[in-house]
Amino acid sequence: MTCFAKQKFVIDETLNDFSLPESDEIIGKIVKVRGNNLHEVIDERGEEYLVSMPTKFRKTIWLMRGDFVVLHQIEEGKKVKGEITKILKKDHIKYYRQQNVWPKFFESESQDSENLKETSSDANSHRESGGQLNRSTDQTSCDRSNSEDSGSESDSELFQNPNRPPLVYESSDSDPSETGSEEE
């Protein structure tokens, strides 16, 4: 597979795989990013330790402090005691709550982060309307944001690395004979 096909497969798996954790897997929260694809996590029992990110996620999906992951613990590790098997997004967390799999340890933290996001989005819509409490303006901005969210919901959840230039695909409108003469 090419590099882009692998990235597409990993992104699709991250967004659309709603399988529940296995018996030997636990849910953890990223506390610190240590570098070298090592992350410090706190698990559902309150223990903090290092976990590694598998090569399939590297340079494709970026984790930030506060993200939730599914971990597979490694018994023989001294410093690194686990490996990330799945990265959880908002939809995964909602699904896990519905299935009563979400740990009680993270219940208040995840609700606080969702409330904080809702509060900041309300403040942004208020700022966009010029600080005026005009119902029609606020309603249209809400309608506009809802229509934008529904179309690009899966793409906006993935973290885009700002340190990398965006990929630009060039269309091949020119003849192949023209490109051959330019190379010489």
Image: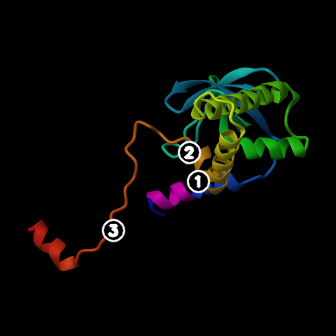
Image quadrant where one finds the C terminus: bottom left
In the image, residue 90 lies in the stretch drawn in magenta: no
Marks 1/3: CA distance?
26 Å
Residue 29: x percent and y percent?
A: 71, 29
Asked whether, in this view, residue 166 is left or right of residue 158, the answer is left
Viewer-nearest of labels 2 and 3?
A: 3
**Residue topped by disc 2:** 57
At label 3, which amino acid type do we have? Ser
Residue 133: x percent and y percent?
A: 69, 31
Mark nearer the N terminus (2 vs 3): 2
SS assignment at label 2: loop
Segment tinted magenta in the rendering: 3-8
At label 1, which amino acid type do we have? Val
Q: Residue at x 74, y 32 (%)?
A: 114
**Residue topped by disc 1:** 10
User: Does 103 sit above or below residue 168?
Assistant: above
> Is residue 86 visible to the viewer in this orientation of the structure?
no
SS assignment at label 3: loop
**Residue topped by disc 3:** 171
Mark nearer the N terminus (1 vs 3): 1
Question: Main structural element of the magenta stretch: helix, strand or loop?
Answer: helix
> Is residue 136 visible to the viewer in this orientation of the structure?
yes
Q: Residues within 10 Å of mark 2 (few under 14, many from 20)?
A: many
Quadrant of the image occupied by residue 90: top right
Viewer-nearest of labels 1 and 3?
A: 3
